[in-house]
Amino acid sequence: MSTPPPVRVRIACGIYEGLLLFGVLAGAGLLYGVLMRPSGSSSWGWGFSVFTLAVTAIYFSWFWSKGETLAMATWHLRLQRRGEAQPPRPAQALLRFAISLLAVLPALAAVGWTGLTSQKAAAWTVLLVNVLGYALLARLHPSRQFLHDLVSGTEMVTLRRTIQKRPG
């Protein structure tokens, strides 16, 4: 039987995931810049934001529907349908992605609405508080699952066996 991973392991996996996603988005940004950006324009505009969001959604949804991303494989984590040992359906993976945006979108909206975009330290603080608050909510659930897993009907499990001490 698989057990849910500790929240700290999922946060560490998420940091590694961010590093991998940086490379994916760098390549996507290069492609967008070559194909879509008007010459002489200094602004990337909303089109680029929508494009990177779509690339990110495709990246995660595709890997999650297979059961794991590269970062999850490294940390011995697997995503599955709740109560089953099957990877999520593509629609579940996409729903999971959409709900997981709650970890960052409220902070980004608050930074934009309050004008903190020029105050980098304050903006990063708001984002960090949002992400950590979202992660800490998982500690309230008995199996330590995140909101996006609860809503999408998925669960994160660890494949690493726990070592139990022998008595005596």
Image (tube, helix red, strand yellow):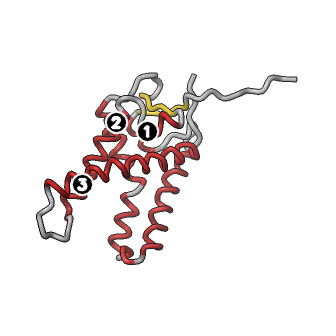
Residue at image x 29%, y 34%?
Answer: 91
Residue 17 higher or lower than 130, as above or below: above
Taking depth in this image into account, of 110 and 120 the one nearest to the observer is 120
Point out the frontmost of discs 1 and 3. 3
Residue denoted by label 2: 93
Tell me the tag on residue 1: none
Q: CA distance from mark 1 to mark 3?
A: 32 Å
The crowd level at tag 3 (other Cα within 10 Å; few <14, some 14-19, many 20+) is: few
Q: CA distance from mark 2 to mark 3?
A: 26 Å
Image quarter in which the C terminus is found: top right
Residue at image x 19%, y 71%?
Answer: 42
Tell me the tag on residue 149: 1
* First-in-chain label (2 vs 1): 2
The crowd level at tag 2 (other Cα within 10 Å; few <14, some 14-19, many 20+) is: many
Q: What amino acid is at disc 1?
A: Asp
Would residue 3 be found to the left or right of residue 63 on screen?
Answer: right
Would residue 123 be found to the left or right of residue 35 on screen?
Answer: right
- In the rendered structure, are the residues bearing label 1 and label 3 in contact, judged by CB atoms less than 8 Å apart? no
Residue that lies at the very extreme toward the right in this rendered image: 168
Image quarter in which the N terminus is found: top right
* First-in-chain label (2 vs 3): 3
Residue denoted by label 3: 30
* Secondary structure at numbered mark 2: helix
